[in-house]
Amino acid sequence: MKRTLNAVTPRYAWTVLAVGTLVVFGALGLARFGYSLLLPSMQGALSLDNSGAGVLATVNLAGYLVLALVGGALAARFGPRIVVSLGMTCVGIAMLFTGAANSYFTAGIWRLLTGVGSGASNVPAMGLMSAWFGPGLRGLATGIAATGTSIALIVTGPSVPRILEALPKSGWRVTWYAFGAFSLLISALSAIFLRNEPSQIGAEPADRRTENHARDFTKPGKLQWSLVYRSKPVWHLGAVYAAFGFSYIIYMTFFIRYLVGEAGYTGQAAGNLFMLLGWCSLVCGFLWSGLSDRIGREKAMALVFSIHAVSYLFFALWTQKAGYTISAVLFGISAWSIPAIMAAACGDVVGHRLAPAALGFVTLFFGIGQAAGPWIAGAIADSSGSFKGAFLLAACVAGLGCMGSLLLKPTGHPVEQGKMLRE
């Protein structure tokens, strides 16, 4: 009987991965980046200036920050399945109420709770890949899961502007309602299909050829939290992740706003470029996360940060259609690589049982950078009359992320990481 279950394991690992990808689709692609598409309409309906729009993004990211840390620890303690399911339920309900908001204050409350649910679901879902995939496939698996965001951009990029055009006054509300309903469906699928680890069905992780290296650093029956919170490699990963959070969120939050408000794009044209970014980002999970399995997490992250920095510079300085398009393509082909590589690196460093807790902890740093980015970018735009300075700042911070990545000790081999943690 055990042999039969082991034979089935690789297939069920891909089922877990498929549901995890849907979780990322809802928790990030809809709950976070849907705001970018709806921002111009929400600004008009709720009388928001750029700083106010930035604050709404910031409170959403602050909610994500808190629950990413707590959610990762809860997932390590109680299992990702229940945490992810409850998190997606919170996301769905909060987005439904965002659509019903009639003031800046109420919109802020529901954007905060949307972030809470996103953090509680996305981080454990990504960390779950370390339990179901061995080191030889771990980077690829987390990269595929990260493409949930790409799929969301592809779907929403062309469709949301059409809804807004057809329903000028209520289109943004209708869109939030649709996002919320679909997120509740994802919650149900998570509860039905996710499993905390292969042993729940008497099986082994996928990628059995690397089983001798896919060991856990925790003692049986006991979670060694010091491997997470006192680990120098984990803190270093967190610092690098903060640079990504700060820089990319400026680009993504104000992408549509900049193109429509300063570059002369129509809403539909900006949405089409957003969709192009999404199509290009479909390859990033396969390309960079798989590459990190071969060349090391640190080298792969450094390459991604370099591409991001060039993308932000082009967006700010090459003020022609070609510049904006190349910027979107460059960002797209590397867009969600850092979170995927980071999830794999956390599994390498602390083992699969503590991977959600480690990912949640480094996401604390990511969240601080992410929460600060829109607020600072909005303030720069209000004071200077343009978002160009904000994109230049994002490029500088991405450069710092590249340097920080190169200073990381190799994170691609879990046995060596086990030795590092004990030093």
Image (cartoon, helix red, strand yellow):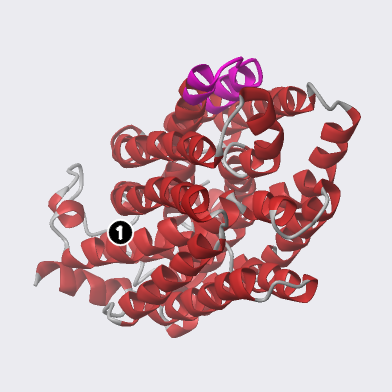
On the image, the x and y values in percent for residue 101 come to 60, 17
Q: Check disc 1 and report the residue beneath it.
A: 351
On the image, the x and y values in percent for residue 387 come to 56, 57
As for residue 105 lying within the magenta part, the answer is: yes
Does any portion of residue 412 appear in the rendered image? no
Q: Residue furthest right?
A: 166
Q: Is residue 383 above or below residue 142?
A: above
Relative horizontal placement of residue 146, taking residue 161 as reference (left or right)? left
Q: Is residue 382 above or below residue 7?
A: above
As for residue 283 lying within the magenta part, the answer is: no
Q: Is residue 97 above or below residue 217?
A: above
Quarter in which the C terminus is drawn: bottom left
Q: Residue furthest front?
A: 384
On the image, the x and y values in percent for residue 288 come to 56, 74
Amino acid, disc 1: Gly
In the image shown, does 81 or 184 lie closer to the viewer?
184
User: What residue is at 54 percent from the left and 28 percent from the top?
Assistant: 91
In the image shown, does 140 or 169 lie closer to the viewer?
169
Query: Looking at the magenta stretch, what is its main secondary structure?
Result: helix
Query: What's drawn in magenta, residue-wise?
Result: 90-108
User: What residue is at 57 percent from the left and 45 percent from the top?
Assistant: 20
Relative horizontal placement of residue 30, taking residue 197 as reference (left or right)? right
User: What residue is at 61 percent from the left and 48 percent from the top?
Assistant: 21
In the image shown, does 207 or 366 lie closer to the viewer?
366
- For the residue labelled by badge 1, is the local secondary structure a helix, a strand or a loop? loop
User: What residue is at 59 percent from the left and 36 percent from the top?
Assistant: 31
In the image shown, does 127 or 213 lie closer to the viewer?
127
Q: Residue furthest left?
A: 423
Q: Is residue 192 above or below residue 68?
A: above
